């Protein structure tokens, strides 16, 4: 570096130090274009604030720092030529340097042509640049990037669309995004967290006004409330910088979970006939307005309940939209959340309208009250899921899988006896005989009770695992783990068991707090897992999960339990399980300041969530990522996928790419 450049940099740094605000006028985005025949062009774009500029790649000796692009070497792809500028630079005389210098204003695009040696791979590197305006300059800065070729760009799901449109979303792209969000909303109905809300919705609106018009109006308000809540959520998070973890916080924090547990219990007791839920007299001015006002407020509350309860299963799409909101893009998350909420609300609204048709059917004794009592039992059973979330997230250890199952066994046994007429509540009619439908319903309930009972003896209960606490909390699993205690050999910590048979380099950090299913061994801290993987010469399987994640438990129960998947996990990978919703406070020296939102992350969950968002642009649970020792992604990440064969192939693909890289 010559004297002129050195003096210029000193002046620049002094200027920055005196400034009250960090000067960084360039926003970078990264993507690629498929040219066919395994040839791609890496696209790197800078959007530059008005009045500022960055410098060209071609700067004369003695001038400012040029823009340069560094690519990490890899055997998976081959560069063709050098990086080049697509945008034509401006060339003006710079008095500070006494020479003509090329620079870019408003926007700059750079490209690099490459050839892929495998179908899917990651291109990583960094852009080094400096920016100036007529007052100040920024110091040279590196912006790192990772681009998944053949998968989703690391710059986010919309990166390729934004680059193709010059950084601005087109109407066609937004329409496509809306349709995708609506499809995700319809899919959300099929998740295990949502189904229990459907009978609750039917029960609620079956208790409404006798007038069809009022019942229909309340049902429509219910549907519109869901749409409004989802749409407002994206906008609120964007404007308030609440961050991408807001939905996860709402669904796992103890306050909303205790609140909803209490409300579900109150509703259940009401359905069992103990009392009627009405609004205070001070809220009404007459009989008709009393019913109308109650319906409006209650319908909105039902919509809010449905949205919050669904978060643990619909988190991946909601989290992805909120990631975009956290980066300041208001339009896309609002449109996406509107589409998701619209599709999600449609089936619920139809179910809400259905009771208005039932009301016109002739009453047959106390059949309608029996339906409400049955739904009361179901709601009471489901209410314990909220307590289970609090217990697991905050590591209280009070509601184990066995305790949860015993509560359900008792409740559903009582439900069976109720259907047989052995138990009667207020407003119930006497059951003089058992009809055919009721008989088969009784058989179904008691069959379910027997099924639940097998869970106390080790049955994973895969059909309902999403509702239950982790299997590792059961007495059966604890007894099994106690039979295969870790062995201490010399100074090296090793774990061997008939189920695990995989060696760990040292005792896992947080191993006293977390565990893996099926006797698998692994780590629960990112850096420690990478270090061990390097020592053992194995790839890393990052498992971003949560205590309250229903889909995580489904994946472990239905996919990880497969013998071939389990063998691969045990023999070929170092598993690093990272909980996103754990609220264990870290010591102050382990706190981090997020580069995403600038906030201090103080818990295990927040640190892990920040890692997932910063590296993979999502806070989805579960998210499985196969990386090398340096944490570089090897193939496209996997989310919830209950197809065992596809998961096996995905593991094999990651292992193959790892072996090729080393």
Image (cartoon, rainbow, N blue to C red):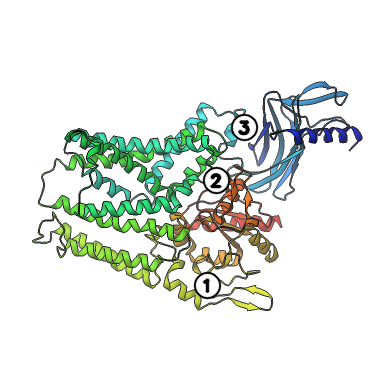
Comes first in the chain, label 2 or label 3: 3
**Percent position (x, y) of residue 594?**
62, 46
Front label number (2 vs 3):
2
Where does the image place residue 579, in percent across and percent down from the top left? 53, 57
**Residue 506 against residue 463 in the figure, above or below:** below
The residue that label 1 is drawn on is: 499
Mark on residue 620?
Answer: none
> Where does label 2 land, which residue?
618
**In which image quadrant can residue 167 be found?**
top right
| Closer-to-camera residue (80/436) | 436
When the figure is inspected, residue 233 is found, relative to residue 563, above or below; the finding is above
Work out how far the residue at label 1 is from the one at label 2, CA to CA, in angstroms: 32 Å
Location of residue 113 by image quarter = top right
Instruction: Mark 1: give few (<14), some (14-19) or many (20+) Cα within 10 Å.
Output: some
Report the residue at 38% width, 64% height from top. Answer: 461
Mark 2 surroundings: few (<14), some (14-19) or many (≥20) residues within 10 A: many
Look at mark 3 in the image and give the residue it sits on.
163
Can residue 642 be seen? no
């Amino acid at each position: 570096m010559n004297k002129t450049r050195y003096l210029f940099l000193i002046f620049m740094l002094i200027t920055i130090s005196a400034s009250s605000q960090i000067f960084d006028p360039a926003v970078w985005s990264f993507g690629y274009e498929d040219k066919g025949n395994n040839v791609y062009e890496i696209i790197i774009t800078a959007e530059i604030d008005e009045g500022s500029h960055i410098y060209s790649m071609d700067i004369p000796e003695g001038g400012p720092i040029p823009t340069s692009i560094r690519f990490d070497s890899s055997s998976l792809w081959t560069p063709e030529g050098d990086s080049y500028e697509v945008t034509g630079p401006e060339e003006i005389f710079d008095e500070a340097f006494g020479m003509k210098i090329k620079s870019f204003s408003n926007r700059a695009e750079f490209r690099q042509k490459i050839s892929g040696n495998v179908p899917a791979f990651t291109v990583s590197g960094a852009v080094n640049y400096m920016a100036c305006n007529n007052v100040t300059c920024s110091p040279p800065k590196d912006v790192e990037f990772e681009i998944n070729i053949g998968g989703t760009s690391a710059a986010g799901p919309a990166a390729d669309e934004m680059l193709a449109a010059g950084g601005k979303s087109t109407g066609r792209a937004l329409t496509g995004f809306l349709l995708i969000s609506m499809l995700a909303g319809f899919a959300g109905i099929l998740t295990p967290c949502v189904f229990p809300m459907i009978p609750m919705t039917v029960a609620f609106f079956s208790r409404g006004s006798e007038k069809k018009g009022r019942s229909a109006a309340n049902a429509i308000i219910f549907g519109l409330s869901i749409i409004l809540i989802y749409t407002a959520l994206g906008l609120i998070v964007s404007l308030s910088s609440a961050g991408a973890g807001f939905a996860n916080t709402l669904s796992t924090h103890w306050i909303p979970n205790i609140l909803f547990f209490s409300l579900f219990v109150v509703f259940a007791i009401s359905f069992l006939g103990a009392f009627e839920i009405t609004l205070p007299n001070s809220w009404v001015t007459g009989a008709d307005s009393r019913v109308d006002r109650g319906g409006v407020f209650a319908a909105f509350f039902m919509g809010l309940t449905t949205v919050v309860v669904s978060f643990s299963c619909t988190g991946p799409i909601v989290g992805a939209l909120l990631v975009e909101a956290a980066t300041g893009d208001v339009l896309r998350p609002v449109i996406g959340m509107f589409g998701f909420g619209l599709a999600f609300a449609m089936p619920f609204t139809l179910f809400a309208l259905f009771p208005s048709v039932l009301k016109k059917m002739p009453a047959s004794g106390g059949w309608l009250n029996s339906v409400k009592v049955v739904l009361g039992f179901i709601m009471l059973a489901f209410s314990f899921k909220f307590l289970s979330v609090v217990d697991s997230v905050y590591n209280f250890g009070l509601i184990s899988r066995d305790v949860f199952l015993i509560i359900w066994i008792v409740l559903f046994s009582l439900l069976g006896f109720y259907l047989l007429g052995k138990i009667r509540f207020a407003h119930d009619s006497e059951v003089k005989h058992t009809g055919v439908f009721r008989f088969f319903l009784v058989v179904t309930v008691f069959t379910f009770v027997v099924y639940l009972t097998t869970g106390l003896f080790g049955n994973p209960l895969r059909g309902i695992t999403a509702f239950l606490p982790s299997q590792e909390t059961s007495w059966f699993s604890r007894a099994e783990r106690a039979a295969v205690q870790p062995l201490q050999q010399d100074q090296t910590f090793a774990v061997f068991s008939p189920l695990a048979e995989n060696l760990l380099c040292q005792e896992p950090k947080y191993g006293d707090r977390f565990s893996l299913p099926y006797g698998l061994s692994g780590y629960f801290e990112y850096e420690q897992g990478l270090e061990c993987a390097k020592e053992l010469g194995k790839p890393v399987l990052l498992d971003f999960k949560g205590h309250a994640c229903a889909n995580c438990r489904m994946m472990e129960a239905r996919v990880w339990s497969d013998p071939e998947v389990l063998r691969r996990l045990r023999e070929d990978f170092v598993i690093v399980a990272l909980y996103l919703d754990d609220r264990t406070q870290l010591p102050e020296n382990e706190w981090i300041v997020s580069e995403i939102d600038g906030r201090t992350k103080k818990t295990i969950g927040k640190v892990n969530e920040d890692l997932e968002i910063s590296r993979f642009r999502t806070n989805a649970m579960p998210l499985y990522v196969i990386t090398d020792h340096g944490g570089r992604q090897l193939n496209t990440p996997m989310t919830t996928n209950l197809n065992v064969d596809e998961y096996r192939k995905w593991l094999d693909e990651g292992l193959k790419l790892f072996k090729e890289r080393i």
